Image: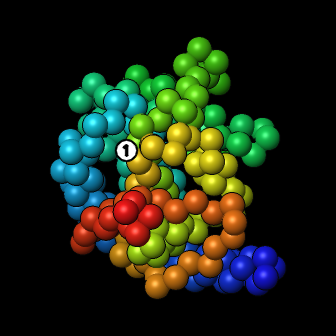
């Protein structure tokens, strides 16, 4: 059963990455997604927000990060550790980031120790992914970085993913360690998943 789920996930991952890569107007769609989440965030009483820094063809988050910093929120960004876990960094300014592992902007090495944050401090997490269903199930890139992070966060923390409509599907195969997310924000809608009820 677990092997079947792994193979299904691999096939889905390839298909949805290809669909996302073929989107010709990702920038315009990202602007719409960022506007939608910007309208939603003030309704959330989150003092400390985690937001991924986009890479490759993901929904762009850089304008959103600038906005969160300007709003004087406590903004946290993830970065890769050597043990296949994510570290969390309290971001004060985008200039604290530099290109790191996998070509993703990450906190500069010399700043990390002094500004490290525990996952239990996160009130709301904005996450990436490859594909999602309306039940809140998320298909990542296969390394488990964000799955491990979600398991370390408080159960009360709100989770939200940013995605293009082409990344939604009827059902994502799940395994026991998979944790659903509460909200999905696309260029067309904000979806409260079944997991948030």
Residue 179: image x %, image y %?
A: 58, 60
Q: Nearer the viewer, residue 175 or 109?
A: 175
In the image as oriented, which residue stretches furthest toward the top? 114
Quadrant of the image containing the C terminus: bottom left
Residue 122 versus residue 197 in the image, above or below:
above
Residue 36 versus residue 22 in the image, above or below:
above
Residue sitting at x 27%, y 43%:
44
Quarter of image, res 176? bottom right
Residue sitting at x 25%, y 69%:
189
In the drawing, does residue 178 fall left or right of residue 123? right
Q: Nearer the viewer, residue 10 or 158?
A: 158
How dense is the environment of label 1, judged by Cα within 10 Å: few (below 14), some, or many (20 and up)?
A: some
Residue 169 versus residue 69 in the image, above or below:
below
Quadrant of the image containing the N terminus: bottom right
Q: Is residue 164 visible?
A: yes
Q: Is residue 23 visible?
A: no
Residue 76 versus residue 4 in the image, above or below:
above
Quarter of image, res 95? top left
* Element marked by disc 1: helix
Residue sitting at x 45%, y 73%:
135
Q: Nearer the viewer, residue 74 or 182?
A: 182
In the drawing, does residue 142 fall left or right of residue 90? right
Q: Nearer the viewer, residue 47 or 188?
A: 47
Residue 69: image x %, image y %?
A: 31, 30
Quarter of image, res 185? bottom left
Residue sitting at x 21%, y 45%:
43
In the drawing, does residue 35 fall left or right of residue 91? left
Q: Which residue is mark 1?
A: 62
Count of marks overlaid on the render: 1
Residue 32: image x %, image y %?
A: 23, 61
């Amino acid at each position: 059963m677990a092997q079947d789920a792994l193979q299904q996930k691999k096939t889905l991952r390839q298909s949805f990455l290809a669909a996302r890569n073929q989107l010709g107007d990702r920038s315009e769609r990202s602007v719409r997604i960022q506007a939608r989440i910007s309208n939603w965030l003030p309704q959330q009483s989150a003092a400390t927000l985690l937001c991924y820094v986009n890479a490759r063809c993901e929904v762009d988050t850089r304008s959103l990060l600038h906005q969160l910093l300007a709003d004087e929120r406590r903004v946290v960004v993830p970065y890769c550790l050597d043990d296949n876990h994510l570290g969390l960094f309290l971001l004060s300014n985008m200039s604290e980031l530099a290109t790191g592992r996998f070509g993703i902007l990450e906190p500069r090495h010399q700043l990390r120790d002094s500004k490290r944050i525990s996952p239990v401090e996160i009130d709301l997490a904005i996450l990436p992914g490859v594909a999602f269903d309306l039940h809140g199930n998320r298909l990542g890139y296969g390394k488990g970085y964000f799955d491990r992070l979600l398991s370390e966060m408080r159960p009360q923390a709100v989770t939200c993913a940013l995605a293009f409509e082409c990344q939604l599907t009827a059902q994502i195969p799940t395994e026991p360690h998979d944790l659903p997310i509460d909200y999905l924000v696309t260029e067309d809608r904000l979806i409260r998943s079944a997991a948030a009820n």
